[in-house]
Image (spheres, helix red, strand yellow):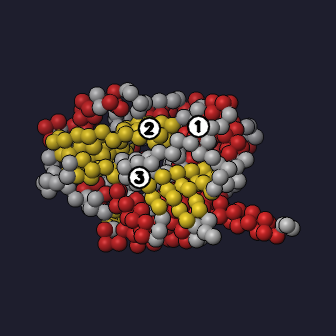
């Protein structure tokens, strides 16, 4: 008899978990509470146009995942060279920042202070033997030195998360904070000379890579992948919110936020209280239809001192926009549920900063829509590790259950890494089920 897997969540992680489970011969039932698949990587149609919930494009880092997704997207797939910018100082530079960009973007005296601070930090890490701090501020200073931390990281991190770096865990730096590739040139030299020690940190974006998109945006990938799963016999259910789960019955892969899963399995009150301490940062996208052929030169641009942190123009990646003489903008900003950004009251400030950047004016905007995500990013506040361990240790008591993905594992994978996490969860669960079956079959009657 075929094994049956129930999957909670129809984002990239859940969909790819379903794909791998089918490959391994399982029956699949997937529940997605929304009216479409995709989760954070989904697209939303408003009027005649599609808007993405942020910038999400398929990479080719994982050949197996890429080939599966490319086959599903078929002729809808468009290859797009990466072209991203970051506003650094008073200019736009290639993203990620290169060494000469750092030199050009920092005033000479500040640059000298930053390089001196970096050198001191490197030597201290090598020779002082001091313990690393448990907060992000200490970790960043230990990694880059005080001047560079104060110049580049402190204010932006505080505004982006609404939390000062000293109140974020040091783990945040290792898992989420991209490395400054330009600074790494200097740091790598010191490592080769054995004047510093190697560090763990998140790799930044590649300078040159090919992305994969479509004329209707991000929605194509999850829609196409879901269609291929249905054709192969999977039972995929939209508008299907599972409120109660018995983790002792059947095989379950969960990609939903950990606090929601803990509630659904009716965990003890103390476990639910601990899970509730695992917080997520909400995000809102101001999706704009703009009466201009083109607003930007790049696919997307990062900003460090605006109300928004990233602006994308999907038309530059091949998105079809109606009317044809118009374009769309995806303006991303973190927020709190119910604040001015979340409700749309911050639109005047959004437009003000767009005008200041020369992107568009108020009179250019034909339509605006709000796209919300309540659990966009896990918040690695100080002490989250202990709470996460309590929850994961409790869940480990259910061998039929795996929780994975960004929300399900409370971590920061990119899209293709989340899909790989889904595949691994399906493999582990089915292998474990086979092992239990074999043990039961060999047991004396």
Foreground: 176 or 68? Answer: 68
69 vs 30: above or below: below
Whichever of labels 1 and 3 marks the residue nearer the N terminus, that label is: 3
Foreground: 46 or 284? Answer: 46
Given the current orientation, which residue lies at the most extreme front position?
445
Residue 312 image position (x, y, % from top left): 31, 49
- Using the rendered image of the protein, determine whether residue 117 is visible from the camera's viewpoint: no
Q: Which mark is residue 59?
A: none
Q: Secondary structure at mark 1?
A: helix
95 vs 149: above or below: below
C-alpha span from label 1 to label 3: 21 Å
Please tell me which residue is depicted at 82% across the width and 70% down the height of the picture: 442
C-alpha span from label 2 to label 3: 19 Å
Q: Which mark is residue 263?
A: 1
Where does the C terminus fall, quadrant-wise? bottom right
Q: Secondary structure at mark 2?
A: strand
Please tell me which residue is depicted at 40% across the width and 73% down the height of the picture: 71
Q: Which mark is residue 238?
A: 3
Compared across the picture, whether 315 is left or right of 220 comes to: left
Q: Which mark is residue 374?
A: 2
Compared across the picture, whether 364 is left or right of 214 comes to: left
Residue 122 image position (x, y, % from top left): 64, 44
Residue 185 image position (x, y, % from top left): 54, 55
Whichever of labels 2 and 1 marks the residue nearer the N terminus, that label is: 1
């Amino acid at each position: 008899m075929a094994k049956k897997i129930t999957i909670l969540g129809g984002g990239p992680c859940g969909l790819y978990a379903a794909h791998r489970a089918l490959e391994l011969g399982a029956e699949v039932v997937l529940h997605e509470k929304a009216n479409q698949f995709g989760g954070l990587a989904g697209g939303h149609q408003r009027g005649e146009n599609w808007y993405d919930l942020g910038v999400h494009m398929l990479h080719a880092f994982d050949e197996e995942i890429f080939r599966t997704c490319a086959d599903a997207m078929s002729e809808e797939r468009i290859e797009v060279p990466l072209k991203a910018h970051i506003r650094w100082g008073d200019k736009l530079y290639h993203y990620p920042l290169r060494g000469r960009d750092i030199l050009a973007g920092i005033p000479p005296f500040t640059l000298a202070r930053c390089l001196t601070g970096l050198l001191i930090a490197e030597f201290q890490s090598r020779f002082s033997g001091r313990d690393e701090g448990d907060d992000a501020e200490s970790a960043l200073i230990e990694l880059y030195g005080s001047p560079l931390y104060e110049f580049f990281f402190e204010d932006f991190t505080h505004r982006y998360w609404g939390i000062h770096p000293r109140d974020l865990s040091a783990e945040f730096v290792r898992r989420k904070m991209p490395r400054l590739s330009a600074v790494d040139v200097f740091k790598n030299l010191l490592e080769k000379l054995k004047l510093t020690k190697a560090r763990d940190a998140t790799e930044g974006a590649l300078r040159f890579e090919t992305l994969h998109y479509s004329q209707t945006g991000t929605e194509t990938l999850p829609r196409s992948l879901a269609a291929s799963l249905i054709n192969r016999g999977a039972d995929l259910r939209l508008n299907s919110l599972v409120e109660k789960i018995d983790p002792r019955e059947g095989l379950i892969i969960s990609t939903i936020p950990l606090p929601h899963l803990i509630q659904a399995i009716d965990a003890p009150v103390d476990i639910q209280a601990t899970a509730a301490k695992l917080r997520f940062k909400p995000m809102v996208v101001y999706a704009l239809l703009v009466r201009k052929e083109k607003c930007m030169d790049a696919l997307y641009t990062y900003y460090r001192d605006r109300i928004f942190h990233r602006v994308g123009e999907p038309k530059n990646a091949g998105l079809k926009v109606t009317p044809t003489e118009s374009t769309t903008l995806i303006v991303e900003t973190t927020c709190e549920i119910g604040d001015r950004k979340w409700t749309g009251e911050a639109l005047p400030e959004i437009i003000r900063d767009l005008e200041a950047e020369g992107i568009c004016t108020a009179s250019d905007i034909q339509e605006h829509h709000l796209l919300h995500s309540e659990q966009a990013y896990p918040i690695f506040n100080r002490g989250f590790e202990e709470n996460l361990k309590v929850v994961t240790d409790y869940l480990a008591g259910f061998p039929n259950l795996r929780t994975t993905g960004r929300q399900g594992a409370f971590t920061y994978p990119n899209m293709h890494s989340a899909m790989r996490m889904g595949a691994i969860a399906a493999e582990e669960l089915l292998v474990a089920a086979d092992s239990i079956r074999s043990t039961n079959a060999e047991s004396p009657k």
